[in-house]
């Protein structure tokens, strides 16, 4: 849910204390238009900006809709001053989210050339204050949110292993989590993958392994009841190679931290 407090922070950052630029009289209409093809997302947030300013949102696409150049994503009408005040914030949010959804869709489609079952997941490498927007954009593009925050799942990472050892770290967190909380254990070598599964990992994360190493680890984990996740340096160009290894999940920070914004334009008066 987009809260009024979030919208107020976004607008306060952009409008400042004395907005002369948008002191325009009268009523107008506005349209958010795609300048390139992609997948629409962030439109709930864009609409919330205008609604906070008492601007009526008369039409908008559903997140996840494919768009082409020239397609209209959202339409508003109301006081010209408030339409113009909301314009830049709405365009920035929708452009950023649509870029994430578009990149996610491209990667999912590339992975599907090798596997119909592998999940493409985001990570916690999100922009502070925009995680909800970015995670929803990943879903709009056909991806998986992964954990939304630290409370959703325990991940045993390299620093935990360095402090307590692999089995010791797994035992430590098993004693402190609910039966409903999954344990995702990161390993950096093929040999450590079955060790993690044997010690109780629900998910074994193969970190920064090559496709060949990933395939070998998947084979070693075949007799264990654990999901297999690949992560680390995977790109649009290599994701199909990883999908072909048989992993259950491919997680990619680049879905959120490196996706370019989709080019959108806001036009008034027609």
Image (cartoon, rainbow, N blue to C red):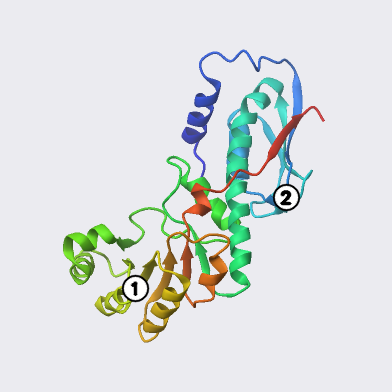
* Residue at position x 56%, y 48% in the image: 259
Apparent side of residue 27 relative to residue 10 in the rendered image (left or right): right
Q: Which residue is mark 2?
A: 37
Element type at marker 2?
A: loop
Q: Residue at x 80, y 27 (%)?
A: 269
- Quadrant of the frame with the C terminus: top right
- Compare residues 35 and 52 and report the one nearer the observer: 35
Residue 51 visible at all: no
The quarter of the displayed image where residue 142 is located:
bottom right
What crowding class fits label 2: few (fewer than 14 Cα within 10 Å), some (14-19), or many (20 or more)? Answer: some
| Residue at the extreme bottom | 223
SS of the residue at dot 1? loop
Residue 173, percent from left and from top: 22, 65
Q: CA distance from mark 1 to mark 2?
A: 39 Å
Q: Could you tell me how many numbered marks the image carries?
A: 2
In this image, 94 relative to 194: left or right?
Answer: right
Q: Is residue 82 above or below residue 19?
A: below
In the rendering, at what x and y percent does residue 194 appear?
A: 31, 79
- Picture residue at 45% right of the left edge, 75% below the top: 212
The residue tagged 1 is 202
Using residue 2 as the reference point, say whether residue 157 is left or right of it.
left
Q: Nearer the viewer, residue 146 or 44?
A: 146
Disc on the earlier residue, 1 or 2: 2
Specify few, some or many for label 1: CA neighbours under 10 Å numbering under 14, 14-19, or 20 or more.
some
Q: Quadrant of residue 53?
A: top right
Tag 1 and tag 2, C-beta contact below 8 Å: no
């Amino acid at each position: 849910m987009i809260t009024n407090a979030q919208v107020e922070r976004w607008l306060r950052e952009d409008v400042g204390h004395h907005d002369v630029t948008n002191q325009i009289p009268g009523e107008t209409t506005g349209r958010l238009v795609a300048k390139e093809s992609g997948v629409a997302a962030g439109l709930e947030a864009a609409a919330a900006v205008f609604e906070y300013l008492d601007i009526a949102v008369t039409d908008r696409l559903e997140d996840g809709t494919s768009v082409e150049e020239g397609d209209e994503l959202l339409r508003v009408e109301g006081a010209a001053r408030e339409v113009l005040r909301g314009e830049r914030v709405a365009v920035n949010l929708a452009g950023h989210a649509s870029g994430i959804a578009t990149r996610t869709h491209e990667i999912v489609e590339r992975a599907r050339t090798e596997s119909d079952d592998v999940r493409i997941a985001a990570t916690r490498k999100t922009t502070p204050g925009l995680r909800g927007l970015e995670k929803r954009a990943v879903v709009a593009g056909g991806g998986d949110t992964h954990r939304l925050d630290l409370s959703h799942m325990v991940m045993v990472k390299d620093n935990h292993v360095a402090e307590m050892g692999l089995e010791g770290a797994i035992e430590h967190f098993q004693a402190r989590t609910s039966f409903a909380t999954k344990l995702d254990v990161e390993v950096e070598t093929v040999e450590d993958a079955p060790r993690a599964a044997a010690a109780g990992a629900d998910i074994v994360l193969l970190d920064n392994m090559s496709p060949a190493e990933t395939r070998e680890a998947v084979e070693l984990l075949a007799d264990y009841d654990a999901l297999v996740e690949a992560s680390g340096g995977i790109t649009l160009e290599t994701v199909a190679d990883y999908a072909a290894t048989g992993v259950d999940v491919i997680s990619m920070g680049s879905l959120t931290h490196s996706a370019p914004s989709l080019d959108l334009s806001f036009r008034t008066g027609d």
